[in-house]
Image (cartoon, rainbow, N blue to C red):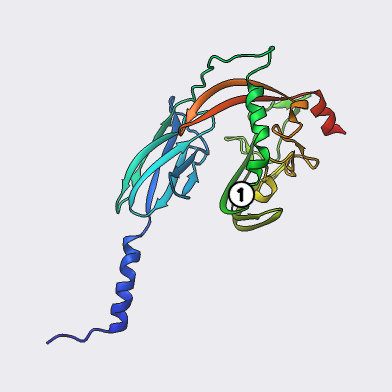
Amino acid sequence: MFKKINSAAYIFFLLQLPFLKAQAVEIYGRVTAKDGNALAYANVFLKGTNKGTTANLDGYYKLDAAPGNYVVAAKYLGYSQKEKPVTISATATEINFELQPENFQIKEVTIVAGEDPAYAIVKQAIKKRKFYLGQVEAFTCNVYIKGLQKMKAYPKKLMGVKVDFGGQLDSTSGIFYLSESVSKLSYEKPNRISEEMISSRISGNNKAFSFNQASEMMFNFYENIVDAQAISARGFISPIASSALLYYRYELLGTTVENDLLVHKIKVTPGANTILQLKD
């Protein structure tokens, strides 16, 4: 004789099956340089998706992904991006990265009348400024911000008086201020911005500056004037503004290829006119 099965419970169980199969699995590891030193706050992401994370101060990271085949990439400023294919099953997977410094090569270039080749590149960027400025109408993203203020070194005495921070400085790490925040940022042209703070943690006493909100750090170099309230109330002229050549000097430091794209490393130095503009 068969027992009578509760139909509602049975249907609920069937509905749960797809969810159980798609449960997220943890990918974790560490990002370091060739010498083994941690690359703090390196970016780690799954190519072709919107999933990514930032490594912590010691280079460790973790992110969640549904079972499947992925390419995990790690990126850090000044280092070449590295990618590793991975198949995620039901268990946590460890993937470590050792990044190599970017190898910028100076190719043979034709210099006209002593002009640095960087100027030709910047002129092309200025020419396309308005085109790229209009590319993004709106976006929404998750933002993680970590602010750290630490003392690298300080004298034990200053003019014969013992230096005492009154317990506000961690004597081991030298950290006197640390802040972390996670938020959801939404933007819609021309200037509609909203930010939902999901979590925020602050320790220590801020004596200089603190970046806790992503909305205060929305810089757009495709605008002629970069409105950077977190840095300067007056803003500054973009290095690719329509009149930027009057205010900056440019120097091509090298060229490399990343993801089949040619990347130029250009040093930008403010000129005398820029300084007068900011002080005006």
Q: Is residue 225 left or right of residue 25?
A: right
Please report the residue visible at 54 percent of the width from the left and 14 percent of the height from the top: 108
Residue 174, image x and y in percent? 61, 35
Name the spot of residue 84 as percent of width and height, x first: 36, 38
191 or 209: nearer the viewer: 191
Q: Viewed as shown, does residue 3 lie left or right of 124?
A: left
Q: Number of marks in the image?
A: 1
Q: How far from the left and from the top, in percent, is residue 24?
A: 38, 56
The location of residue 145, given as percent across then percent down, is 59, 46
Who's the residue at 30% across and 74% down the image?
A: 13
Give the quadrant of residue 17.
Answer: bottom left
Say whether residue 257 is visible: yes
For label 1, the crowd category at 10 Å Cα-Cα, with few meaning under 14, some 14 to 19 and many 20 or more, is few
State left or right for residue 7 relative to residue 158.
left
Q: Nearer the viewer, residue 35 or 20?
A: 20
Give the quarter of the figure containing the C terminus.
top right
Image quadrant containing the N terminus: bottom left
Residue topped by disc 1: 136
Residue extending farthest to the left is 1
- Please give left or right for residue 5 compared with residue 69 in the image: left
Of 266 and 36, the residue lying toward us: 266
When asked about the image quadrant of residue 271, the answer is top right
At a point 40% along the width and 34% down the height, the residue shown is 97
Name the kind of residue labelled 1 in the image.
Val
